Amino acid sequence: MSNVLEAQGLKKGYQNFTALKGLDLAIPEGAIYGLLGPNGAGKTTFLRMVNQIIEPDQGHLYFSGEEMTPAHARKIGYLPEERGLYKKMKVGEQALYLAQLKGMPAAEAKEKLKAWFIRWDLQSWWDKKVEELSKGQAQKIQFITTVIHEPKVLIFDEPFSGFDPVNATLIRDEMLRLHSEGATILLSTHRMESVEELCTHIALLNRGEKVLDGKIQDIRESHRSNTYRLVYRGEGPETFSIPEGVTASPKIADAKTGHHAVTFKASAPLSGALMAQLAPQCDPISFEEVLPSMNDIFIQTVQA
């Protein structure tokens, strides 16, 4: 798989603060790539470099194998965390203006914008001023202007901020649709549930450095803790007969189903052997290895 974006040795400093300390990053074409990290990790600095807003002090950025230039910006759609629409302009006029900035002819831009407004039932907003819209409504408009030119790469910085659950779901579904149509998505967010649900790959930055990257499933597998969960019918034994080196948590009852669950922690991988020993002692429903969540991995890695 080729890389659509690649960073090599990016460094950036601001007076007495170093935002990036030699960042190397490769974003595969067709990925939904989560860019994670605590505040001040260097995420926004990297995104601004990709969008040609600022330049690195050292290092190189590549777009589909070519050194990035301002011309590549037209192949990128960027929705920043800090939204920026002109409050006194009419919604339709502004959307049309922003689409043309990305190189779209006026007639084509108007046609595609009208189609988006109809699909999202926003026709009545076309002649309203931005200042008349709620924060969530303005964010919808900015989302549309971010994707209207059908860029190869879409960058979303906290795209769900300020949205209620219904509209957050709408934005998520649109992101997935755009991805299915070939867009590579770079997602910067603090919402770990969004990372688990959407992303295929992640990179974790901390204090200007990359501390973790790769496919989500590979990262979760590499942080496995040999923890297993058994769900079974009925009461089961008070204590299970388990191999040496395995500890069991107190069983938990589900009042609705009458099922019980016990978590086991082993000193080494024991999935098949452990299940073989547990199964005759109860009426099992399910047995699975419990991999750490991305939230757990994030906290563990940043605090290390």
Image (cartoon, rainbow, N blue to C red):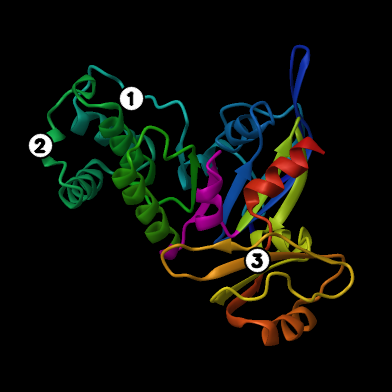
Report if the CB atoms under discs 2 and 3 are less than 8 Å apart: no
| Region of the chain picked out in magenta, as a range | 180-200
Q: Is the residue marked by circle 1 packed among few (<14), some (14-19), or many (20+) residues within 10 Å? A: some
Residue type at numbered disc 1: Leu
Of mark 3 and mark 1, the one earlier in the sequence is 1
Depth check, mark 3 against mark 1: the one in front is 3
Of mark 2 and mark 3, the one earlier in the sequence is 2
Q: Is residue 57 magenta?
A: no
Residue type at numbered disc 2: Ser
Residue under label 3? 262
Residue located 20% across and 43% down the image = 110
How far is the residue under mark 1 from the one under mark 2? 18 Å
Q: Secondary structure at mark 1?
A: loop
Q: Quadrant of the C terminus?
A: top right
Q: Is residue 275 above or below residue 11?
A: below
Report if the CB atoms under discs 1 and 2 are less than 8 Å apart: no
Residue under label 1? 85
Residue under label 2? 124
The picture places residue 291, in percent across and down from the top left corner, at: 68, 62
Residue located 19% across and 33% down the image = 92
Q: Quadrant of the N terminus?
A: bottom right
Horizontal relation, residue 276 to residue 89: left or right: right
**Which residue is the extreme one toward the right?**
244
